[in-house]
Image: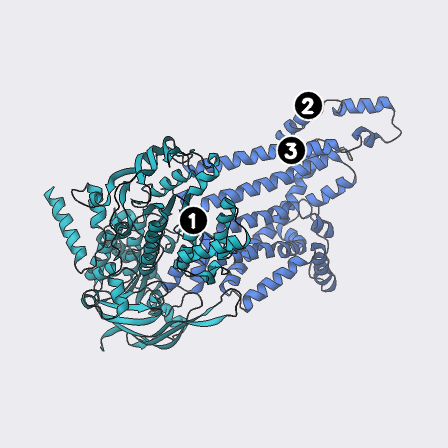
Amino acid sequence: MHPVLTLVVQRIALGLLLLLAVSAVIFLGVAALPGDTAQAILGQSATPQALANLRAEMGLDQPALTRYFQWLGGVLTGDLGTSISNRTDIAAAIGQRLGNTLFLAGWAAVISVPLAILLGLVAARYNGRWPDKLISGATLSAISLPEFVVGYLILYFLAVKWQLFPSVAMVFPGMGMMERLNAVILPVIVLVLVVLAHMMRMTRAAILNVMQSAYIETAELKGLSPMQVIWRHAFPNAIAPVVNVVMLNLAYLVVGVVVVEVVFVYPGMGQYLVDHVAKRDLPVVQAVGLIFAAVYIGLNILADVISILANPRLRHPK
Amino acid sequence: MSDALLQIRNLRIEATSYPPGEAPRDVVLVDDVSVSVEKGRVLGLIGESGAGKSTIGLSSMAYGRGGVRLTGGTITLNGRDIRLADARALRALRGREVTYVAQSAAAAFNPAIRLMDQVVETCLAHKIMGRAEAEARAVMLFGRLGLPDPETFGKRYPHQVSGGQLQRAMTAMALCPKPDLVIFDEPTTALDVTTQIEVLAAIKEAIRDTGVAALYITHDLAVVAQVADDILVLRHGKRIEYGTTEQIITAPNEPYTQALVSVRSIEHVEKADAPAVLQIQNVTARYKGTNFDVLKNITLDLPAGQTLAVVGESGSGKSTLARVITGLLPPGQGRIRFAGRDLAPDLAARSRDDLREVQMIYQMADTAMNPRQTVGTIIGRPLEFYFGLKGAEKRKRIQDLLDQIEMGSGFIDRYPAELSGGQKQRVCIARALAAKPKLIICDEVTSALDPLVADGILKLLLALQAAEGVAYLFITHDLATVRAIADRIAVMYRGEVRRYGTKTDVLAPPFDDYTELLLSSVPEMKMGWLEGVLDSRKMEAAGN
């Protein structure tokens, strides 16, 4: 087997193992919370018999280990359990909301990643001169403001004052693509502004670090233009650090959008999570937690794999 | 001299220096240097580090490394002054008219790009020729430079070929766009001596075949004598002497050039046999997680107060031997006897006296010292640790040690950054000496130093040995150093001792094949040496 394939398979196996461990931590964490689910559903006035019946029905009288494996087995077969607060199937509810969140995150990623890398390259090219200072300053101020401030500022100007875009990001099934895009444009802008700075600054730093290498001097002495030097000679060697930061930000786009979703009343995972935390709906919290963990771990595995593939020493062993 | 390809007149190069704790100041790197290169000729630039040879070499592409500024004089290339040319004009001439071969090809090739794409890049960027033509030319050059499988060589990545091959590939890269001038910046310095001779021959042949002019930069006069038509001797950025190669090496005018020519003048007569202080008995060792022996059944004796030189190329296992003796790498088999007792295989199991009596000096004095400690602290540490010296007593001993290494007590409060390369190595010697060891392991201690400075270090080591009776295990790849300092010699090759004995025995025929190859590869300071060696090797090969 090619050594790279071995490495990649190892990373994926490790990731799955990690996910399993995280599922146990989530389950234990939620199980350790004080309070009784049956009591929470039936209220203070429930009779002991009613409570016992409900516990037996929900399987709460089983030992924790059994419940964990039941839950895990359910998750593996696509059954995330039933919501306590509204008695609906969690998987069905999450399916649509996850789609919405991925739609929002996807567009934010499609715009922000190339833009951040491009700005990073330009900033590195003009290191210490005005384009660099302008880009660094602008992205830094965007990230320094809390995202809800950015959100409300944009809302005020673009939606309320100039009335360019809708202020509430309403999406519903059966909506056309253009309508959908129009609806999410403001939250996308906010998310782009929030994640841009990290990725841009990492790109810039990684490129400048590589620019110290002897092979960059070789490229300059070949008479290549500065942008050719950066793009052809520096960037391929800066991929690994950049990819890691990009993936962390993509993960943030999925799991960290809670605030932005609330600001724009967007029916995504964040909203869903906030609602159900407020209602102490533990099965939902558990399921959402697991999905967020899977996204994080998955994207980090992807980052590792890309870093491995970007390394010619691993790709082409002696 | 109207047909000069490159004419440098009264060149002045400056840079801003930022000494620690002081205000930045401008320093002059090159001062009033004039030189010219005609078409098809090779000019050697020679001098020690800091002489400004690389700086002058790069100035012929109007390139200043770091913050280096070309502040005065003229640099006329193909009839026009390029010193103050704008960025666009410079890009047009770099790679097209002048190309560059760097000292470390391993660092100068981009690790992420296949060799062929890097070699033809200049041709394509300057539209000198199309890709097909450029690749055909590259394959032709690979063949001429003696690279294996020229047709497929370019498909590899830099890490997939050896250092010597990379250096040849870099030469091919420089010659591919058919430049008028190639700058060779110490192209063989980082190579083993047996590889150096091959690369040197390949470069020389390539220069002759393509008729290109060249600047050949090196600190090794014996090397430059093989390839250059003329030689410019530089020191501290100033021109010392300029003449034909023959004149410079046979009849140098200036005292400095004379010193360079006669360097390694140490006459060291080997000492009579003495009881062994160190006995390495049947030692076999390998690194964790590997499945081959880096050392194979090594048996060597080092008599007390004498020097055992361990010579070999990189990868021969000589530094691993030092790690086994110091206990950093416990051997798989065999034992180390020291001063009549067995040394524990593992460092952690050794007594404080065991540790004290075996000291080490490293190749890179820079990295072997804490940059935030003063010379006094560095030398004082073993005094405190092993002998519990404190206060005035300690300071007195530090001063004695500084006197012994011929530096004087004025250095006691200085930091490593304020010392020259030779001075740093002297401080490391004093630190080793402070422990009053019976054995000092010297790992390539002079290979990072300029010849004259290295000479001083070797003389110091010999004087200290005479005074203190300390034994040296001297690891080196440089046979000239071995001749200067050794009482006994062990020649190592791929983890085995190929030849071992007193200096006279080891350096006298009949030789085994490897020692013969090693000895005959050391450049000699006479013209035509390279051809002579290659011819005799060819005849031998034909005779077999």
- Above-or-below relation of B354 to A194: above
- Above-or-below relation of A250 to B121: above
Q: Amino acid at mark 2?
A: Thr
**Residue B415 visible (yes or no):** yes
Q: Chain of mark 1?
A: B
Q: Quadrant of the N terminus of chain A?
A: top left
At mark 1, the secondary structure is helix
| Distance CA(mark 3)–CA(mark 1) | 57 Å
Output the letter for the chain in cyan: B
Drawn side of residue B460 relative to residue B519, left or right = right
Residue B373 pos. (x, y %): 52, 55
Q: Amino acid at mark 1?
A: Ala
In front of the other: A44 or B227: B227
User: Residue drawn at (66%, 53%), measured in percent from left and top?
Assistant: A184
Crowd tier of the residue under label 2, counting other residues whose Cα lies within 10 Å: few below 14, some 14–19, many 20 or above: few
Q: Are marks 3 and 1 in contact (CB under 8 Å)?
A: no
Residue A42 pos. (x, y %): 84, 30
Q: Identify the residue under disc 3.
A: A23
Residue A10 pos. (x, y %): 49, 35
Q: Are marks 2 and 3 on the same chain?
A: yes
Q: Chain of mark 2?
A: A
Q: Are marks 1 and 2 on the same chain?
A: no
Label tally: 3
Label disc, if present, on residue A66 of the rendered structure:
2
Q: Quadrant of residue B253?
A: bottom left
Q: Nearer the viewer, mark 3 or mark 1?
A: 1
Residue A34 pos. (x, y %): 79, 33
